[in-house]
Image (cartoon, grey):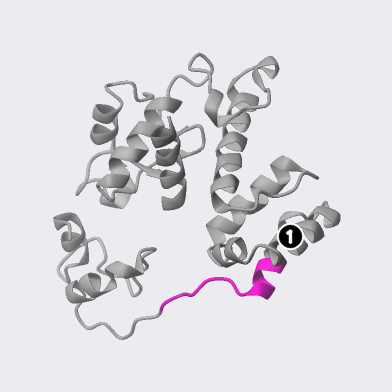
Amino acid sequence: KSQFMQNILKSSSLYLSECDIVITSRPVTMPELLSDLEGTGGHVEILGFKTKQIHSYINSYFSQNAQLAAKLIEKLKDLPSVCGMCRIPVILQIVCRVQEYLGEAGLPHTMSGIYNMYICRELVQFLKVFGTSSQVTDIKLDNISNDVFPFFAELCEVSFKFCKNQKLVLSQTELSDALRGSILKCRGSMYGLLCSETVDEFFSVFPEHLYMFTHKTVQEALAAVYVAK
């Protein structure tokens, strides 16, 4: 349990003095968090989307392509393990992005395959925005060009190192040290997979930009790319 979180959750803290609700995306930490919260009135756990909500989200995401929405909904019926993961909203968004990227091609049958396609999709999007049209080709994770994506190999290595330490959020100093000084100097994201975020209200407590992966599972997928190589 970090001293940073203890300072934030203290009843005497200035940062949450008017806060009535504390939300965490890591329910496993709730026993520790509750021990730091005084006068807690209740504990509510959000279990995620139900099947009807999953279908509603997919239809909304593909509002301009009802045929692709129907195809994805039908496909998920045959992939119960993938459908189960779609109860988590951010993972459902990842699945939708992969289906959008693949178009009429079939969705991969495993989450590993889906994450591989998601990483490729984000790299392609990066090139479309910051590269040239000639660079946008059929990207494969086993053949990523260091010239086109100079930080990708380092990003995968960082993902692996911090997975071992069970860290999802990294400080600018930690990331810069891990990348051996290669960190981009501007705020933003690295290929849409590692994003920079600053919470102004906490800056006096932790005066650094923070970097976080889109989701823990994305970090694990990038770590797997490093291990595979």
Q: Residue at x 70, y 41 (%)?
A: 101
Q: Which residues are magenta?
A: 45-56
Q: Is residue 209 visible?
A: no
Q: Is residue 212 above or below residue 21?
A: above
Q: Is residue 129 above or below residue 4?
A: above
Q: Is residue 95 above or below residue 79?
A: above
Q: Residue at x 61, y 75 (%)?
A: 50
Q: Residue at x 62, y 64 (%)?
A: 83
Q: Which residue is mark 1?
A: 75
Classify the position of the C terminus by image quarter.
top left
Q: In the visual, does 12 lie left or right of 222?
A: left
Q: Is residue 65 visible?
A: yes
Task: Pick out the residue farthest to the bottom.
Answer: 41
Find residue 104 and report its horizontal and vertical position in percent.
Answer: 80, 45
131 or 226, which lies in front?
226
Residue 214 falls inside the magenta stretch: no
Disc 1 marks a residue whose amino acid type is: Lys
Q: In the visual, does 116 lie left or right of 134?
A: left
Q: Is residue 5 above or below residue 97?
A: below
Find residue 200 and report its horizontal and vertical position in percent.
Answer: 32, 47
> Label 1 neighbourhood size at 10 Å, few (<14), some (14-19), many (20+)?
some
Residue 53 falls inside the magenta stretch: yes
173 or 48, which lies in front?
48
Q: In the visual, does 228 lie left or right of 168?
A: right
Quarter of the view holding residue 1? bottom left
38 or 167, which lies in front?
167
Q: Residue at x 34, y 39 (%)?
A: 160
Find residue 81 and report its horizontal and vertical position in percent.
Answer: 58, 64
Find residue 117 and report its horizontal and vertical position in percent.
Answer: 61, 40
